[in-house]
Amino acid sequence: MKSKLTEIQNVLGSSGISICFSGRFSQGLIEEIGDAVKLHMENEERPKNDIFNVFSIFVEQSQNIKNYVISKENSAGYNRIANSAIVSIGQEENRYFIWSGNVMENNDVASLQAKLNAVVGANKDELKKMYKEQLKKEFEPGQTGAGVGIIDIAKRASQPLEFSIETLDETYSLFELKVIV
């Protein structure tokens, strides 16, 4: 019998992924994985700035997924959405990446795509300005944060954010975000 775990490990290794979690997120789990990420990078004697940026981006991406899942608690597809989360951390060309994904409802795609397109096309100065402007806005009912997370991620990234949204069926799409530090 060929080991499925060995196959998974080979796929992760060939993709440069050293840490990966797939499944339902909780706040405690995000904190535990975040601590593991910091320890892993400290053991590799990475610069403190890299450690901080990777940790911060990991936490922000994971929180975004968790908050989206919470917003869908009363949705018919809640379990599908909640169990779809995946976040991985790895290296390519001596740079770290944080790559996340989750299933989302198609009716949420347009607003997310608009936010991402605005951020992806912005330079560092424009991102700083967007960040400050977003902080000045009033919270909307049901809003879980100030809306600066994706801007902060882009500010910490060394390259433009990479994202894709793939339609899965008439109700759901798969969203992926890759950030290179």
Image: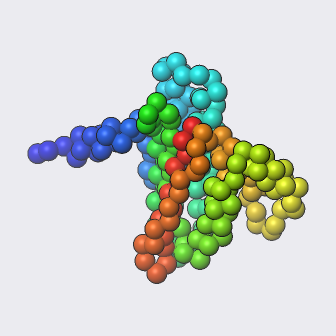
Residue 150, percent across and down? 67, 52
Lateral position of residue 9 relative to residue 151, left or right: left
The residue lying furthest to the bottom in this view is 170
Lateral position of residue 47 relative to residue 18, left or right: right
Nearer the observer, 26 or 165: 165
Write the residue at 64% across / 31% down: 52
Compared to residue 17, the image places residue 47 above or below, namely: above
Q: Quadrant of the N terminus?
A: top left
Q: How is the image coloured?
A: rainbow
Residue 134, percent across and down? 81, 56
Nearer the observer, 107 or 97: 97
Q: Quadrant of the C terminus?
A: top right
Write the residue at 53% across / 57% down: 163
Residue 3, percent across and down? 19, 43
Report how many numbered discs are placed on residues in the image.
0
Compared to residue 54, the image places residue 21 above or below, namely: below
Write the residue at 81% across / 66% down: 140
Residue 32 visible: no
Residue 86, percent across and down? 47, 52
Lateral position of residue 120 relative to residue 5, left or right: right
The residue lying furthest to the left in this view is 1
Nearer the observer, 133 or 102: 133
Write the residue at 53% across / 67% down: 104
Residue 38 visible: yes
